[in-house]
Image: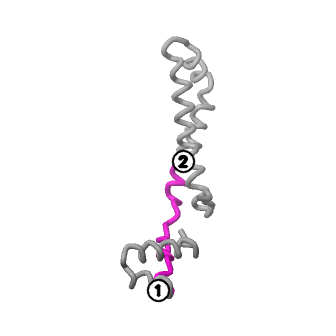
Amino acid sequence: MEVTQFDKNMMTATFAEAGKHGAAKEMLKGGATGKSAPAPVKSKPYFKALLFGAVSISCYVLVFTNEKKVTDICTMGGINTIYPVLAAFFFSFIHGAFASNLLSCLGLQAKK
């Protein structure tokens, strides 16, 4: 986070009011620029992207090759109605993790 000139002036006033005149003068001279250290370079999650991509593809292949069995189980009623909900959560998590890691590998990050 970059410190603006207004922030710098307010910090200087705060230090001066607290009796730390030396620190306030140093801030006015430009000794404390307020710039933070550069963020550490993170390695790209190539392995995670490949892993979640492989799991995602494998799950989709398993579901579509066993379509009849999946349909029979999910339409039995009763307590078995939880299976489609759990499957939706599972696929959502796996596909979301894959997409997140893939976008990180491509260097796309959300704005903060």
**Cα distance, mark 1 to mark 2?**
44 Å
The residue positioned 55% from the left and 13% from the top of the image is 76
Mark nearer the viewer, 1 or 2: 1
Q: Amino acid at mark 1?
A: Gly
Residue at point 41%, 73% (across, down): 17
Q: Can you tell which quarter of the image residue 56 is in?
A: top right
The residue to which callout 1 is attached is 31
**Rendering coords of residue 106 (x, y %):** 62, 62
Q: Which residues are magenta?
A: 30-54
Residue under label 2: 97
Residue 34: % across, % down: 49, 76
Q: How many marks?
A: 2
Q: Say whether marks 1 and 2 touch (CB < 8 Å).
A: no
**Of 108 and 53, the residue lying toward us:** 108
Compared with 47, 74 (above or below) is above
On the rendered image, what quadrant is the C terminus found in?
A: bottom right
Q: How is the image coloured?
A: one colour
- Please identify the residue farthest to the left as the structure is shown: 19
Residue 108 or residue 44, whichever sits in front: 108
- What is the chief secondary structure element of the magenta stretch? loop
Residue at 60% over, 37% down: 60
